[in-house]
Amino acid sequence: PYLEFSIGKYLAIKKALYITAHDSVYGNYLEFGVFTGSSFNFAMKINKKMNRIFKRKIDTQFVGFDSFDGFGEIKPNDEHPSFNDNIFKVDKKKVIKNIEKNAKGQKFKLIEGFYHKTLENKKTSDYGINKSRIIMIDCDLKESTSLALNFSKPSLQEGTIIIFDDFNFYKGNVNKGEFGAFEDFKKQNPDIKFRKIFDYGYSGRAFI
């Protein structure tokens, strides 16, 4: 299951990069929940392939957000038996070194810290982000996802693809997890229209 989970995620990123390249949707690739950096590295690698396929340079800056130290405090509404703080602690230096090795000329930056410090009351312009091409949300919890969505809002444009990697968890509860955060975000921003474009893997869903 873990292997299939990862392959599904990679294919989702590949689809999103292809669709946005095909439709000339340019901007940043934002990833919330970098963890070991595997999907972040994969996105940079595939973007170089899209440059060759479409025979034009798609100037994308890859921006990753992660504490590299787990979730921190998990509020009662976000408690889940499989989302354990200790599971998501990684060797930050090793992750950064691996990303630097795989970048191969692609522009990237990593924003380290818990989201309350790096996203709340921050503007996209604080990190040099203008428009978003793809937003990969892999932060599992409702609170983290809400912070990521609200932070990213000014960067949304027609054609931005948002990928939720853990959309189907929390037993289908409409008030929890990434699903619950997205439902709240849509209610708070009725002028922004979304359309589901595909499901993937065991729990993922993408919107445009």
Image (tube, helix red, strand yellow):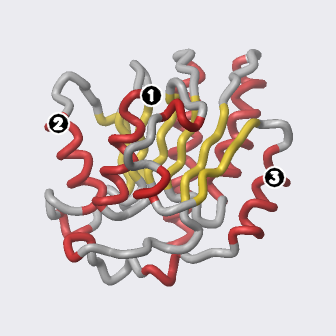
**Residue type at the position of mark 2:** Gln
- Within-10-Å neighbours for mark 1: few <14, some 14–19, many 20+: some
Residue 185 placement (x, y as % from top left): 23, 41
Residue indicated by mark 1: 155
User: For the point 60% across and 51% down, which residue is it?
Assistant: 111
Determine which of the numbered discs, if any, sits on residue 100 in the image: 3
Q: Reading the chain from its start, which is encountered first: label 3 or label 1? A: 3
**Does residue 188 lie above or below 78 as drawn?**
above
Q: Nearer the viewer, residue 61 or 127?
A: 127
Report x, y in % for residue 108. Answer: 71, 42
Q: Amino acid at mark 1?
A: Ser
SS at mark 3? helix
Query: Marks 3 and 2: in contact by CB < 8 Å?
Result: no
Q: CA distance from mark 3 to mark 1?
A: 25 Å
**Disc 2 to disc 3, how far (Cα)?**
38 Å
Q: Secondary structure at mark 1?
A: helix
x and y, in percent, of residue 204 in the image: 39, 54
- Taking the spot 65% from the left edge, 51% from the top edge, the residue there is 110
Q: Residue 78 sits in which quadrant?
A: bottom left
Q: Number of callouts in the render? A: 3
Horizontally, residue 150 falls left or right of residue 85, namely: left
Nearer-N-terminus badge (2/3): 3
Q: Amino acid at mark 3?
A: Glu
Q: Residue at x 28, y 30 (%)?
A: 195
Residue 64 screen position, x and y as percent = 59, 49
Q: Is residue 88 above or below residue 25?
A: below
Quadrant of the image containing the C terminus: top left
Q: Quadrant of residue 22?
A: top right
Dot 2 crowding, Cα within 10 Å, few <14, some 14–19, many 20+:
few
Residue at (52%, 16%) from the top-left corner? 23
For disc 2, the marked residue is: 188
